[in-house]
Image: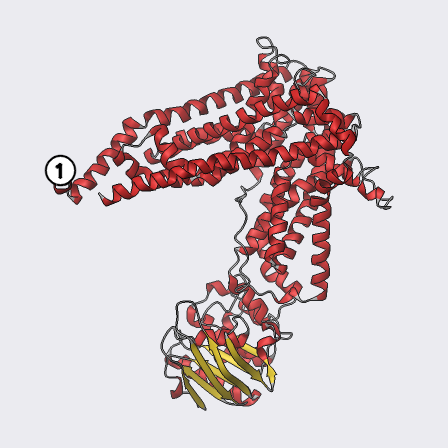
């Protein structure tokens, strides 16, 4: 169970934002709201890259805010800059992962990425990078998955496929999946909960 | 009324025409002199350099030139200098890069400040003072031995390497740290998010960052160590550790074998040329990198026990190699006998000569640099590439020619006309000006060119030109850089022990030369006191230059007023 309680964050010269959330394992939560309201900031706080003004974030009763980012049970797909541009797709995927399993191969094939495996990340298009970042995020097998605009550079067919992978991963691994999306993700995803910021 | 009339008449179109006309007028007529001054200086520098080179060739070619070049003693000198330079480069890179990694990983603002300040200190400390400090720590009767670590007593090759690491590791540290800081923050975010190990971080982020720096840094340090003079002279401890410059010095000063000196000088120039040609230019700034913002960079390897241990040892080595020699001078100082220094006339004479040399050297080199940059700027506007390259060549030519080679060449060229032992002051001054010029140009050029471009149209419109423009508009804007170059050229000149060793005598001594004399005679207390004095003197002067320039800064408020008035009109 992920519990966000009276989490308040504020950037200089911006409005204060308070978030409350309760999400259980195996559920997909869609977070939406106008641009600049703090959706990405919320993800950065859960991942450990920003500190909130007050409030708490707990998972299975443990306070996440006192844990450094690399020890948190969180895997995040950021809006951009998820991969090292000077490394190949394979090298990027293998960072922090021990074996190149059959599952990775299947996911790459499903999202039509397998032929790019040995290409440098800097040579790929925005959509290709986004799909690889999605696979990389799911690979880490953490109980909390945060996906920040995972479909923004994908075409309709790919959105459908990406949604299928997210759905399947959430059910199979029993994860809590939080998604920020401006697109109509609900058309292809079974959203369990919706939160609107602002 | 006249103002109102002008305002009504002056349309935007007329304004644009005015600028076009004035710009072309200015470029073709008004700034003719400023272009010519630079070319004139360039011509003098090039002619002098070429004349020295021609004279060296003539002198070397008198007899058995190839016999000297291919002799076993020349090979021995090159081999010895090459091996020493290789080891110095290797250790400087290792210490500098490891410390930069440790500093970036820890990221504590205070630690960053202390380490970067110490590294800057090491860059401006005169070689003579550093050599003294290194002996005070690692010498036979040094600090390490007095602490009971009797096994640690370095001399000869290792002492020279240690001194070279003292000067070059801080340079590597600053460059490598800046490079790490310039990496996108998301690299560290990904590393942290994926909990990459220390080895993975090194492989994925740090190594690609350092890889591009290694060749330019290594070639620069190798060149500096290969052509090292005063350190090898003071700490080499005999003929086993030598460089071509030291051998030239011996040939001129002790055996008066001018043919050997000329031949070795040519070899030195050839090797330097090859090294400069094969090396890549290194872009670095002497100013400190921006302070670390801990909100954005979170390194996950900070908690690792192994990384804590290696970082601790890196900082320990850094402080032992860089800071301890400077501290040891104070620690070892015997104040009662050290104060005897100030009772000696030789000290006061040396102080007077050094001050005169350093003052004129810093002023002349800065003025020449400003004139050259102005010229380059005007020539760039005209698109005169050949002239720009000519000015660049005339300055960088002296990078190929170490000071001892320059002095030897001048001596051979003009010995029939000038008694250099009587007029050594001018030769030392010229050498100091010429050899600090490339560094001053490097620091001053970007800031001055930017300011010239910014104030160009406005100063023309207001009719502020020439020296008035420099005092009112330009100098306040480049205040910081001016302080830096004046301070650096002053320090460079005050601490220089190269040309003076050839022509110095009891009637013409500088502080470093006097320090070298005391050092050779084991006048430890007085030498320590003199070392501390030189160090303090450099910093006080740097501070005074800052104060003088601050008064110029006040002019900025006036210039701002002028600019505001003009903008309002």
Q: Secondary structure at mark 1?
A: loop
Left of B228 or right of it: where is A122? left
x, y (%) of residue B408?
63, 19
Q: Which residue does the image show at 43% across and 41% down from the upper left?
A: B447
Q: Please provide percent x and percent y for residue B519.
A: 76, 28
Q: Tell me if I can see residue B214 in this picture.
A: no
Residue B491: % across, % down: 59, 32
B69 relative position to B147: left or right = left
Q: Is residue A111 above or below residue B126?
A: below
For residue A52, above or below residue B40: below
In this rendering, position of residue A27 left or right of residue B468: right
In this view, the residue in front, B125 or B38, is B125
Q: Quadrant of residue A87?
A: bottom right
Q: Is residue B147 above or below residue A131?
A: above
> Residue placed at 59% from the left, 28% from the top?
B493
Q: Is residue A11 left or right of residue A90?
A: left
Q: Residues within 10 Å of mark 1 (few under 14, many from 20)?
A: few
Query: On what subunit does the disc labeled 1 rest?
Result: B
Q: Position of residue B199 (x, y in %)?
A: 66, 63
């Amino acid at each position: 169970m992920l519990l966000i309680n009276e989490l308040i964050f504020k950037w200089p010269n911006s409005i204060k934002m308070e978030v409350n959330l309760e999400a259980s394992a195996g559920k997909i939560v869609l977070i939406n709201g106008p641009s600049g309201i703090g959706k990405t900031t919320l993800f950065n706080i859960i991942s450990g890259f920003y500190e909130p003004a007050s409030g708490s974030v707990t998972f299975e009763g443990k306070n996440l805010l006192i844990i450094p980012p690399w020890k948190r049970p969180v895997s995040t797909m950021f809006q951009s800059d998820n991969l090292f541009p000077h490394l190949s797709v394979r090298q990027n995927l293998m960072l922090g992962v021990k074996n190149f399993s059959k599952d990775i191969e299947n996911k790459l094939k499903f999202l039509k990425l397998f032929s790019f495996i040995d290409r440098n990340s800097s040579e790929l298009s925005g959509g290709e990078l986004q799909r690889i970042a999605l696979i990389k995020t799911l690979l880490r097998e953490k109980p909390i998955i945060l996906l920040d605009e995972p479909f923004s550079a994908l075409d309709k067919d790919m959105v459908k496929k990406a949604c299928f992978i997210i759905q399947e991963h959430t059910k199979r691994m029993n994860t809590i999946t939080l998604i920020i999306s401006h697109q109509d993700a609900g058309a292809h995803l079974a959203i369990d909960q919706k939160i609107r910021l602002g | 009324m006249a103002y109102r009339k002008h305002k009504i008449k002056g349309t935007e179109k007329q304004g644009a025409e005015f600028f076009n006309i004035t710009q072309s007028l200015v470029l073709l007529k008004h700034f003719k002199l400023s272009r010519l001054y630079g070319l004139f200086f360039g011509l003098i520098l090039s002619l002098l350099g070429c004349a020295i080179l021609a004279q060296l060739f003539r002198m070397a070619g008198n007899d058995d030139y190839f016999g000297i070049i291919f002799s076993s003693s020349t090979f021995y000198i090159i081999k010895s200098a090459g091996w020493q330079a290789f080891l110095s480069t290797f250790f400087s890179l290792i210490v500098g890069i490891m410390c930069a990694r440790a500093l970036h990983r820890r990221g504590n603002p205070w630690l960053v400040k202390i380490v970067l300040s110490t590294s800057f200190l090491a860059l401006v400390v005169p070689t003579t003072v550093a050599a003294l400090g290194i002996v005070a720590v690692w010498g036979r009767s040094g600090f390490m031995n007095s602490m009971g670590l009797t096994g640690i007593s370095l001399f000869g090759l290792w002492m020279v390497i240690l001194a070279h690491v003292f000067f070059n590791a801080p340079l590597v540290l600053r460059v490598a740290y800046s490079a790490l800081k310039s990496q996108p923050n998301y690299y560290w975010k990904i590393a942290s998010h994926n909990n990459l190990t220390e080895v993975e971080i090194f492989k994925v982020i740090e190594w690609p960052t350092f890889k591009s720096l290694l060749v330019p840094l290594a070639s620069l340090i190798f060149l500096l160590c290969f052509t090292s003079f005063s350190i090898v002279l003071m700490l080499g401890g005999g003929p086993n550790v030598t460089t071509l410059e030291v051998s030239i010095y011996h040939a001129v000063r002790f055996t008066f074998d001018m043919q050997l000196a000329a031949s070795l000088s040519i070899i030195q120039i050839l090797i330097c040329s090859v090294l400069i040609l094969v090396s890549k230019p290194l872009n670095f700034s002497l100013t400190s990198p921006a302070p670390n913002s801990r909100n954005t960079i979170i390194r996950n390897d900070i908690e690792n026990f192994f990384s804590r241990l290696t970082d601790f040892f890196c900082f320990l080595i850094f402080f032992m190699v860089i800071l301890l020699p400077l501290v040891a001078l104070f620690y070892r100082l015997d104040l009662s006998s050290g104060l005897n220094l100030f009772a000696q006339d030789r000290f006061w004479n040396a102080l007077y000569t050094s001050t005169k040399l350093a003052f004129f050297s810093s002023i002349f080199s800065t003025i020449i640099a400003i004139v050259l940059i102005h010229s380059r700027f005007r020539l760039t506007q005209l698109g005169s590439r050949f002239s720009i390259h000519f000015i660049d060549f005339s300055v960088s030519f002296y990078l190929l020619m170490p000071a001892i080679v320059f002095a030897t060449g001048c001596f051979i060229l003009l010995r029939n006309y000038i008694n250099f032992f009587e007029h050594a002051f001018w030769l030392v001054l010229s050498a100091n000006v010429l050899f600090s010029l490339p560094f001053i140009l490097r620091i001053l050029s970007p800031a001055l060119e930017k300011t010239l471009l910014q104030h160009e149209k406005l100063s023309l419109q207001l009719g502020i030109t020439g020296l008035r423009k420099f005092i009112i508009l330009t100098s306040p804007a480049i205040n910081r850089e001016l302080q830096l170059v004046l301070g650096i050229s002053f320090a460079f000149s005050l601490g220089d022990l190269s040309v003076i060793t050839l022509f110095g005598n009891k009637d013409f001594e500088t502080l470093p030369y006097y320090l070298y004399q005391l050092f050779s005679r084991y006048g430890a207390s007085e030498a320590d006191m003199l070392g501390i004095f030189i160090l303090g003197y450099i910093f006080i002067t740097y501070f005074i230059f800052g104060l003088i320039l601050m008064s110029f800064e006040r002019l900025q408020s006036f210039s701002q007023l002028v600019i505001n008035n003009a903008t309002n009109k």
